[in-house]
Amino acid sequence: MAQPWLKTKPAAGVDPAKPPADGPLRARILIVDDDERNAFAACQALEELGHELVTAKSGEEALKRLLVEDFALILLDLHMPGMDGYETAALIRTRRRSADIPIVFLTAVFRDEAHLFQAYTAGAVDVVFKPVDPFILRSKVSILVDLHLKTEEIKRQSEHRKWLLDENLRVRGEKARAEKALRESQERQEAILKCLPIVFTSRSVEPPFMPLFVSDGVRAITGFGPEDFMADREFGLSRIHPDDQDKVIKAFRSCVQTGAYACEFRWRCADGSYRLLLDQGVLAPAQDGKAREMFGTILDVTDRRSLEEQLTQARKMEAVGQLTGGVAHDFNNLLTVVLGNVDLLARRGDKDAKRERQLAAIRHAADRGRSLTRQLLAFSRRQHLNPQTLDANALIRDFAPLMQQAVGEAITIEVKVDEAPHCIHADPAQLETALLNLAVNARDAMPNGGAFSLTTRRIGASDPYVLAHQELRDATWIVIEVSDTGQGMTSAVLDRIFEPFFTTKEVGKGSGLGLSQVYGFVRQSGGHVIAESRPGEGSTFRLFLKASAKAAAERPAAEPPRKALRGDERLLVVEDDQGVLTLTVEMLRGLGYSVVTAADAAKALEVLESGEEIDLLFSDVVMPGGMSGIELARLARDLRPDIRVLLTSGYVGAKATMAESEFPLIDKPYERMALAQRLRDILGARRKKVDKVSRAEGETLNAARAG
């Protein structure tokens, strides 16, 4: 094949791939000279040779051209600024692509033998002195270029002959190549069939619908190869789940009438597990009297169906959460009125055993309603949490005796936790409730007794369990593992245990909200809960809560019940529910407070702007009129920087959660003792501050009088 610096133009109608056998050859010559006049003179002298002339003004430019272009000859000036001819020639000779190009040096300065010897040593084939004699330059260039052109002509003829031989071989090997292409196409199709997660099948239209072809992809799905299906005509149907066999046979039979079929069924794989397969196909047209066939595809849809079920489950849980949030506020308002009035009735002086039993029954029912509401809010992750940094090990050790009382003496509780703290950031009361729910659930799974164990451990990103669960790879976790030796659960039950109101217990034996509370609390705390169980092998629940780098806060010791604390401050109560408002006013006045009321935020602002003395604003969070209790509290603080605020709500939504650190909050339904204590916690500090200022002012006044 001709070199890139040789220019030949194929004749019209000639195959471009065919190397030309004749035609003039044209060479390219590179002239390197920093003096444009010298370069022009050289071009004038060589122009009549008919070759392509390319000029470069420096050695650097020449080297750049040689990186991408090829030349038959290089005319190189020796004396140039920067990189001279010797350096340029040395670099040209170091490159394999340009090492064999003849170099003719041009010089007007270096004429002595030493420079001539250096020039030939640098790789020059000749030296021409300036001023250049055009005749001498043309002669030398012509000789060198003609020598290369003759060499290239020999190469061209050789390539042409080689092309003729190759063309002859191509023609003779056309059949062989076609056969090879067909074979490669078949191999490619087989490779594609193996890689696709789809099984291609062909089966008879007559029972038992024996497979005539099964692609190799069936091995990845079922663990069996195509030969297993082809060897036994009953093999495929025999491993279909018994409950699905009639449905599959009916679908195959209908294909003869409708021309197509589609069915989903469970198929028992080599490892004994069932996979959900989608088989669909069409009836192939009859050809040349051959028996008709059904062409089909089988797709493993187990994971897809599982994801669809998870999505459906997530939507169902979200719907329950929205429903719970919608009714919790109004329901807790009702419970506030019920519990408050029960408390007021119980405080009356007349003692009657029957009346006290009735009040106790009402309180018990209201408490159950409050508990159910809180469990639903916990499940839907809308409950009001009071998280703090705590030692999970210490909490479990302290709470174990109470769990033992809950499960009874027939069940042994084993606590295996380290003495060293495992700190987490969570609501301790909700964590204790979650552990108690798990303990009660384990007790019910062990009616004849058994063992219930609690262990903790710290795991990081490199733990095998973390690596096996994608959702755990973003943090360091404290794992609380709760196990029992009970009856265990089937996979169908295990998939639904966290659903609210789902229970396998008898009617009246459980609400179905205990595990929902566990799930909701852990998820709202930024963690995960994973349950594992098999029938007859017990159950294990793992609660993953993020590890905290902070030290655990000291848990205050439980204080015995005290009498309701009283006060004499003036409170502004803002509540849109008339029943709750009436009850709250009666409770507050009974505690010694002076009360001003407002049904909404607008009326409350009128009171605040009127200048009336108000020590504390006690407002519901959710109110009509377009302004929430949080917004009202912020405006009240702007109007009166010294005013104290206490908010309340039967449902702590997203806005209230954001404001938890800004204003204190008491959940509905609240009772008299809890409300009295919360008010004194807020107003007590203010009173001490006022008393301190008053004492200081009094001392100043006494000092002034004494002076």
Image (cartoon, rainbow, N blue to C red):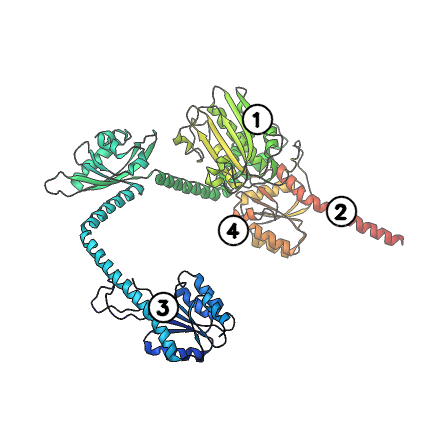
Q: Which residue is mark 1?
A: 415
Residue 691: mark: 2
**Position of residue 539 measured from the top left corner of the image (x, y, whole percent):** 46, 28
CA–CA distance between discs 3 and 4?
Answer: 93 Å
Mark 2 or mark 1, earlier in chain: 1
Q: Amino acid at mark 4?
A: Pro
Q: Is residue 518 above or below residue 636?
A: above
Q: Amino acid at mark 3?
A: Ala
In depth, the one of 397 and 467 nearer the eye is 467
Q: Is residue 426 above or below residue 621?
A: above
Please say whether residue 27 is visible from this viewpoint.
no
CA–CA distance between discs 4 and 2?
Answer: 38 Å
Disc 2 versus disc 1: nearer the observer = 1
CA–CA distance between discs 2 and 3?
Answer: 107 Å
CA–CA distance between discs 4 and 1?
Answer: 50 Å
Residue 72: mark: 3
Q: Amino acid at mark 1?
A: Val
Q: Secondary structure at mark 4?
A: loop
Disc 1 versus disc 3: nearer the observer = 3
Residue 624: mark: 4
Mark 2 or mark 3, earlier in chain: 3
Mark 4 or mark 1, earlier in chain: 1
